[in-house]
Amino acid sequence: MKGLILAGGVGSRLRPITHTQSKQLIPVANKPILFYGLEALAATGIEDVGIVVGDLEEEIRGAVGDGSRWGCRVTYIHQEAPLGLAHAVLTAQEFIGDNDFVMYLGDNLVPEGIATFVQAYQEHGPDAQIFLVKVPEPERFGVAVLEGDRVVRLVEKPTEHISDLALAGVYLFNPSIFTAAATIEPSARGELEITDAIQYLIDHGYRVRAEMITGWWKDTGKLEDLLEANRIMLDRRGRDVRGDVDAESHLVGEVVVEEGAVVRASVIRGPAAIARGAVVERSIVGPYVSVHEGTRIEDTEIRNSIILEGSVISGARPVADSLIGKNVRITKGDDPPAYRLMLGDHSELQLP
């Protein structure tokens, strides 16, 4: 069995951050989202992983490398444009060959892992298997109608309610999916939809079964979802303080301060994570804040936010519910209500 991670999307809902970097490399709890997918595939014993990439291929190559840190071999597969998940499947056909494969969307998180999902596929032997989760807004997703564990109908982003069971971003297929993907027509939005390809299998007598997610799953395509994912993953990290924390500072609750990080005269309220090379001075950080490598925070209060590497935040009181890009500079202003920001890489903001 092989693995396939899709990382070619443009991330339009996270602009301006995604104008300059892949959405799959935005860190959640100071780890790129894509890495969680690689860990999930590696935990099933899969050794050959293809990553479908687009215009930001070099950035993803630089972050992932050859895959050896996860015990797998990574092959990069260039997709000409983000023309739908079924198009990505066709793009990867040469890599997959005659093998069954797991397809994992690179901006999704399934903290419970997918090992039992793969085991169920191997035990039941369907032509395709999908992961489903109950959602409050099914119109945002592809949804499924079931008879037992058998899938009988799929609809992409339905305009009327037919089911609250959404397809999560993990699929298992045998090579019959290539015939389906090559046969369907583009949808109204000009994409080859994976839901249409799976519906083709259903209509032509192939067996498609479903497994339910019993824990937590998140599609991190929007700012609110990304911040929620950060909160949940920080909750799982526990307390680990290896950095340089002075006696004037107070660490409250589940706080991670990596080796090489510096905390001076500050309060860090967990869950929170301070990466190596980061400096926090005279500030209140947390709860639910991830501070990435090489960032400096001084005279600032910040909560429920993700700050990417190399940024400087000085005198901002308070910042909340924000995603701050790489190498951003935020400088001192008067005391306003909480700022809520999403700033792209290399921005510079002087607060009023």
Image (tube, grey):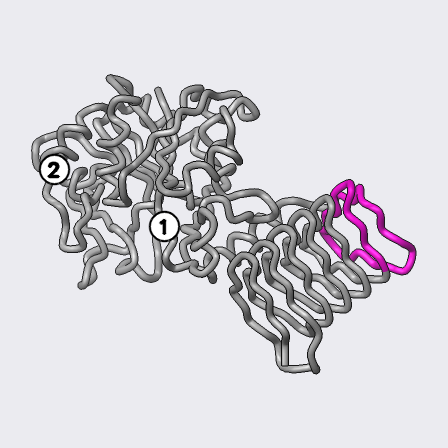
Mark 1 or 2 closer to N-term? 1
The answer to which quarter of the image holds residue 106 is top left
* Amino acid of disc 2: Tyr
Assign the C terminus to one quadrant of the image: bottom right
* Amino acid of disc 1: Val
Give residue 24's position: percent from left, percent from top.
Answer: 45, 45
Q: Distance between the residues labelled 1 and 2?
A: 27 Å
Q: Residue 130 magenta-drawn?
A: no
Picture residue at 60% right of the left edge, 63% below the top: 304
- For disc 1, the marked residue is 10
Picture residue at 68% right of the left edge, 70% below the top: 331
User: Which contiguous range is marked in magenta?
Assistant: 240-264
Per the rendering, the mark at residue 194 is: none
Q: Is mark 1 on a helix, strand or loop?
A: loop
The answer to which quarter of the image holds residue 53 is top left
Q: Residue lying at the far right in this picture: please name it.
A: 247
- For disc 2, the marked residue is 200
The answer to which quarter of the image holds residue 298 is bottom right
- Horizontally, residue 292 falls left or right of residue 22, namely right
Give residue 63's position: percent from left, percent from top.
Answer: 53, 36
